[in-house]
Amino acid sequence: MTSEPPAGRHRRKLTSIGRFHDPSARRRTDRRHRRPYPHVTDWPRTLLVRDWCAADSATVARWRYPDRWSVYDQRPDDAIAGRRAIVDAADGTLVGYYCTGEDARVPGLAADDGVVDLGLGMAPDLVGRGHGESFATAVLDDVRRTQSATALRAVIQTWNSRSLALARRIGFVATGTHRCGEVGHEVTFTILIRHGDS
């Protein structure tokens, strides 16, 4: 499931179900020094969720999403607080991640007691190939194990019909919208809530 910064502070955000990024970040990166990211071509037989590490940040910073999806590109210095890695249990290859709390909350959207904000992202080679529910199930299982909140909240850019459809399939229900300005233009997000073990 890919809203803006607190007043007076510019923040880049995360993911496909999750967060909004500064689309100019890629243009500011010196392309001559960018290493290609390791491509992930096969979906793992088993997924494992583990703690995030510096190598994961470097890998995700080299992921590049096509066309309009490039808003989900990241840089090595993007926030990683509350992030967890989803990997191939057999060889440790990073296939995606999720984050909770402030790192998953879009700017201007206040925290809500008893609700955990959730954002997630998948390796660009694997997006759109029918793996979303398997990936999201691994995330939800880990969230249940590590979080005590009774509800989850995700915010997804309203144009992102693919992530919105996935969110609804795994039990999220749209409850409203959130608008915020970033990099000189306004973006609309759909707010979705998932209660308990729905």
Image (cartoon, helix red, strand yellow):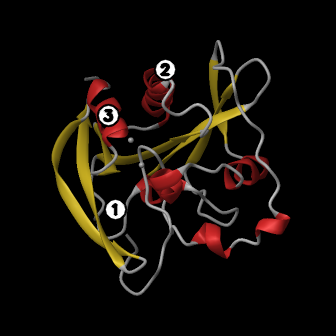
Q: Residues within 10 Å of mark 1 (few under 14, many from 20)?
A: many
Q: Residue at x 70, y 31 (%)?
A: 40
| Apparent side of residue 61 relative to residue 38 in the rendered image (left or right) | left
Residue that protrudes farthest toward the front in the picture: 67
| Apparent side of residue 193 relative to residue 176 in the rendered image (left or right) | right
The image position of residue 10, as x and y in percent, is: 47, 79
Q: Residue at x 18, y 42 (%)?
A: 174
Residue type pointed to by label 3: Ala
Asked where in the image residue 9 lies, by quadrant, the reply is bottom left
Helix, strand or loop for disc 2: helix
Q: Residue at x 51, y 69 (%)?
A: 22
Which tag, 3 or 1, sits closer to the chain's start? 1
Determine contact: label 2, label 3, CB under 8 Å: no
Disc on res. 134: 2
- Of the 4 image quadrants, the one containing the C terminus is top left
Helix, strand or loop for disc 3: helix
Q: Is residue 95 above or below residue 157?
A: above
Helix, strand or loop for disc 1: loop
The image position of residue 36, as x and y in percent, is: 79, 49
Q: Measure the alpha-carbon separation of dots 1 and 2.
A: 25 Å
The image position of residue 160, as x and y in percent, is: 34, 46
Q: What residue sits right under mark 1 in the picture?
A: 3
Determine contact: label 1, label 2, CB under 8 Å: no
- Is residue 65 in view from this perspective? yes
Q: Residues within 10 Å of mark 3 (few under 14, many from 20)?
A: many
Q: What residue sits right under mark 3 in the picture?
A: 167
